[in-house]
Amino acid sequence: MVDGIISRVKSIVEAGILVIGHLGLTPQSTQTFGGYRVQGKTKKSFEAILEDSIILQESGVCALLLEAMPSETAGKIASHLDIPVLGIGAGNQVDGQLVIIHDLLGLYKPFRPQFAKCYVSEIITDFETHLSNFEDIRQMGIDTREDGLLKLIELALNKYVHEVKSGKYPDNKYSYQISEKSIEKIKQSSYW
């Protein structure tokens, strides 16, 4: 799949510009996949993504983003590469996580991805506690700008970072699942 863009990737890298590859579900290619579909759930899909990952690494990308994949296959792909592999809905076996701020804050209408965790409901009590520390909330807002959405976003981002670093996010609830039968078929790949 990446064959058509490799020369472009190499040219951009040779120009001194960092390139991050993006495989798995690529929103710009959803029509190719028949819509928003989890990738890497079959032997064929796993092998194609792994082969493209290796080609991208050899072309000079500095990192790779895997999107909408089960933890098991995304993790196996990451283990084959020497570059950092980030996941967005690719489970907890990759090197790092990426979540779009809209998903983190619950700004998804009408579609909410399986891996999207809204942190606002989890930090609202912290925000209320923060506000209760000030006698004059309006003045505090003038002085610090910590009386509204900026503070809510900061608290939500801090909670997200803490959960990623501690390994709490993404857990199985926020990861795409794959059946044991499918994994057994994928394990027959020479890449496994």
Image (cartoon, rainbow, N blue to C red):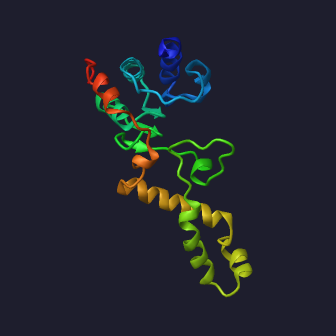
Residue placed furthest toward the bottom = 135
> How many numbered markers are drawn?
0
Q: Residue 6: x, y in percent?
A: 48, 15
Does residue 89 appear left or right of residue 104 in this picture? left
Relative to 145, say whether 12 is above or below: above
From the top left corner, tell me how far across and down residue 11 is, in percent: 51, 18
Residue 83: which quarter of the image?
Answer: top left
Q: Is residue 86 above or below residue 130?
A: above
Which quadrant of the structure image shows residue 136? bottom right
Measuring from the top left, give residue 135's x and y in whole percent: 67, 88
**At 27% from the left edge and 21% from the top edge, which residue is drawn?**
191
Please indicate, yes or no, whether residue 139 appears anywhere in the rendered image: yes
Decide which of 159, 81 is in the foreground and name it. Answer: 159
Q: Quadrant of residue 77?
A: top left
Q: Is residue 26 left or right of residue 144?
A: left
Q: Is there any visible trace of residue 155 in the rendered image?
A: no
Pick whichever, 112 or 49, lies toward us: 112
Residue at image coords 44%, 38% = 176
Residue found 60% across the figure and 60% down from its top = 153
Of the 4 image quadrants, the one containing the C terminus is top left
Q: Is residue 149 above or below residue 60?
A: below
**In the image, residue 98 lies at what x, y percent?**
49, 44
Q: Is residue 97 left or right of residue 54?
A: right
